[in-house]
Image (cartoon, rainbow, N blue to C red):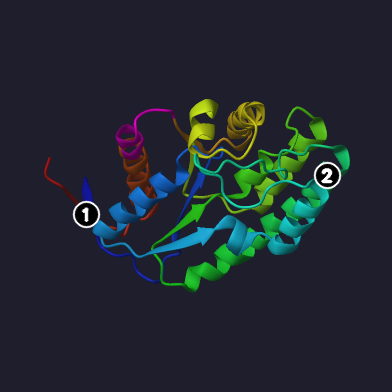
Amino acid sequence: MWLFQTMSSAHAPKIISFSGIDGAGKSTQISALKTCLAEHGLRVKSLEFWDDVVVFSRFREFISYKAFKGDQGIGTPEKPLNRRDKNVTSLPVTVMRLFFYLADSVSLRLILERMKASGADVVICDRYIYDELANVPLNRWFARAFVRLALWVSPKPDAAFLIDADPGAARARKPEYPLEFLRRNRESYLTLRQLAGRMILIEPSSIEAAEATMKAAALERISRSQPALSQVPLAG
């Protein structure tokens, strides 16, 4: 392991994003990374994509609930839900999504630009534009063209993690969407990873093994992109 000196405020914060299907374990990995970076003396800011970046988020949530009549909230094993929002794939809904997702891409760029003056060393994003792009039909040419546009508009993270998971296990942890949708959504994420070309895949494994892989990759990316950091090897 390594210890890092705090970055100079003259440097823009490093961006680390976490993406994946619902129930993949993103929150667990994010919590582990925050603890790790704090132990290394780095100042960390959080960015919740839906709450902090998405334009008209409450309006979109309300319209989705009224139009599709799905459940609201977060599903748990004790209280499963049947959400109907991103798993609705009609053509009019898809067209509307493309408009909003492009607006979200612009919003993401503006917000991350403003965060350069936040004093943070690292900004950890709970979901990113990738999580929206995984909802478009990537088997269609127009969707792939749109993805390339949105990726061009959106800032590229220093480390973009795709937390992979078995859809059945993910649904058991967070029962909100039908299993068949989670399977399709997982394949869409893997396809998107090929299109984006920068996502670090954390394959299904134990929590401890996934954390170790993720932390090593995150610290390596932070160190590589910030030559001013001083490093000393940790014991063990």
Please report the residue visible at 51 percent of the width from the left and 68 percent of the height from the top.
115
Mark 2, secondary structure of its residue: helix
User: In the rendered image of this protein, does residue 141 appear above or below residue 34?
Assistant: above
Callout 2: 10 Å neighbours few (<14), some, many (20+)? few
Q: Is residue 158 left or right of residue 73?
A: left
* Magenta-span inclusion, residue 65: no
Q: Which is closer to the viewer, label 2 or label 1?
A: 2
Residue 175 relative to residue 91: left or right: left
Report x, y in % for residue 86: 71, 43
Residue 126 location (% of width, % of height): 51, 52
- The answer to whether any part of residue 64 appears in the image is yes
> What residue is rendered at 31% in x and 41% in y?
216
Q: How many marks?
A: 2
Q: Is residue 219 left or right of residue 189?
A: left
Residue 69, percent from left and from top: 77, 47
Q: Label 1 sits on what residue type?
A: Leu
Dividing the image into 4 quarters, which one contains the N terminus? top left
Residue under label 1: 3
Q: Residue at x 29, y 60 (%)?
A: 38
Q: Amino acid at mark 2?
A: Val
Q: Is residue 35 left or right of residue 88?
A: left
Between 160 and 205, the residue placed more toward the observer is 205
Q: Earlier in the sequence, mark 2 or mark 1?
A: 1
Q: Which residue is mark 2?
A: 93
Residue at position x 66%, y 40% in the image: 82
Q: Is residue 210 magenta?
A: yes
Residue 164 visible in the shown view: no
CB contact under 8 Å: marks 2 and 1: no
181 over 62 or under it: above or below? above
Quarter the C terminus occupies? top left
Numbered range of the magenta stretch: 203-211
Q: CA distance from mark 2 to mark 1?
A: 48 Å
